[in-house]
Amino acid sequence: TYLSVKSRFETFRFSERSGALQCMLVAVDRETQTTIMGVCEVDNRPPGGEINPAPRPYISNLAVHNEFRRKGAATALVLESENVVRGSWGKPRLHLRVEGDNDAARAMYERCGYSEQGVTEDTITRTSLLLAKTL
């Protein structure tokens, strides 16, 4: 049902110095070939200036259009992220954060094999969970 398009967003100079990779994945409806169902980013850039940085490689900004939620688009993006990290980058583990009260997302990540590694409370009293999976 999904087509994943990958491309690396990095500057040549930064990549050469740091070895960092970044990938944007896009899930597109196969029927229309133009309808974007969801997106996510995967990167292994060293954290720079972040408060409570997550370990790398890291899935971030996973978002699925309301029309395509609970139809497998997010799972497809997570699985493709794992393929990139394990296959193309040769990394053995993948991390992500999810809001503690996002039960649907937490359940999906658990079905994909992710487990809780830590909890962060921010100043707005949101709870963020760090999840990880050995690939």
Image: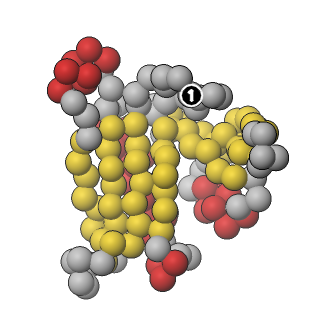
Q: Secondary structure at mark 1?
A: loop
Residue 83 vs residue 36, the one in the foreground: 36
**Across the whole image, how many numbered discs are drawn on residues?**
1
Look at the picture and state if 84 lies above or below 91: below
Q: Residue 94, percent across and down? A: 50, 38
Look at the picture and state if 101 lies above or below 127: below
Q: Residue furthest left?
A: 12
Which residue: 61% across, 56% down? 109
Figure colour scheme: secondary structure
Residue 29 vs residue 114, the one in the foreground: 29
Q: Residue 114, percent across and down? A: 62, 47
Look at the picture and state if 103 lies above or below 93: below
On the image, numbered disc 1 is attached to which residue?
50
User: In the visual, does 120 lie left or right of 30?
Assistant: right
Which residue: 40% across, 37% down? 43
User: In the visual, does 91 lie left or right of 7?
Assistant: right
Q: Residue furthest right?
A: 125
Mark 1 crowdedness (10 Å alpha carbons): few <14, some 14-19, many ≥20: few
Let me know if residue 19 appears in the view.
yes
Which residue: 27% across, 68% down? 3
Q: Residue furthest front?
A: 124
User: If the image is split into quadrants, where does the N terminus sit?
Assistant: bottom left
Which residue: 76% across, 59% down? 101
Q: Residue 123, percent across and down? A: 78, 40
Let me know if residue 87 appears in the view.
no
The amino acid type, in three-letter code, at marker 1 is Glu
User: In the visual, does 122 lie left or right of 65?
Assistant: right
Q: Residue 17, percent across and down? A: 26, 14
